[in-house]
Amino acid sequence: GDSVTQMEGPVTLSEEAFLTINCTYTATGYPSLFWYVQYPGEGLQLLLKATKADDKGSNKGFEATYRKETTSFHLEKGSVQVSDSAVYFCALKVQGAQKLVFGQGTRLTINP
Amino acid sequence: DTAVSQTPKYLVTQMGNDKSIKCEQNLGHDTMYWYKQDSKKFLKIMFSYNNKELIINETVPNRFSPKSPDKAHLNLHINSLELGDSAVYFCASSPPGQLYEQYFGPGTRLTVT
């Protein structure tokens, strides 16, 4: 079946550090890939997406590149801020499927 | 202007009770979802409706029954609540043809004692 695996959290960094959150996937068809973010006390919101191989999604300083050869979609940011503290979810949707498949989430805490 | 709203935000109840959670979206979306998020933040889809028609019904106890009176509303009724039902329940919606771009409500934290 389709699945998403993210790096185990929690991840704790200092402000202005470089961030990578790893995400790999298995899919029965051709997937589109997404990162969602959940700030404390809120619902999830779409952060960025990539719909085909080698696409790069970007938003709010975050980037992720769809790597079909390594079945990965790692999230990166060059300089994190305290306000980036949240839980990050990697997700996929296979063409024709009705639902998103989410990873287990990675909690990120940024210290000032 | 809240896009996806849920009521109540918090719900504390005893085992065996029956409770409902309501969801409304004012985005004009056709598809709505219910998710359950456990204490470890793992997110699991429960149900999805497209234009009032049930399209996803995951392996969920039949004590859970969704109802969609119209495409802007999706309610979740839970019978005979159990301790394991304690979780945060999220409603979401997505626009036509863009099932991946889901807009989530703020969640309902259900605590069963």
Image: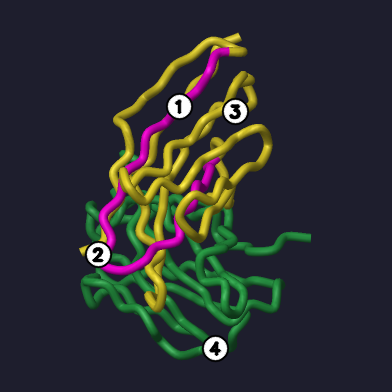
What amino acid type is highlighted by mark number 3?
Asp
- Mark nearer the viewer, 3 or 4: 3
Q: Which residue is mark 3?
A: A84
What label sits on residue B16 in the rendered view? 2
> What is the x, y in percent for residue B6?
58, 62
**Which chain is indicated by disc 4?**
B
**What is the quadrant of residue B2 in the picture?**
bottom right
Image-based side of A1 in relation to A35, left or right: left
Image-based side of A14 in relation to B65, left or right: right
What amino acid type is highlighted by mark number 1?
Thr
**Which chain is indicated by disc 1?**
A
Tell me, yes or no, whether dots 3 and 1 are on the same chain: yes
Sort mark 4 into few (<14), some (14-19) or many (20+) by Cα contacts within 10 Å: some
Q: Which residue is mark 1?
A: A20
What label sits on residue B51 in the rendered view? 4
Element under disc 2: loop
> What is the x, y in percent for residue A18?
53, 18
Frontmost residue, B9 versus B29: B29
What amino acid type is highlighted by mark number 2?
Gly
Q: Is residue A24 magenta?
A: yes
What's the CA distance linking mark 3 and mark 4? 35 Å
Circle nearer the N terminus (3, 1)? 1
Question: For the point 66% across and 42% down, which residue is it?
Answer: A59
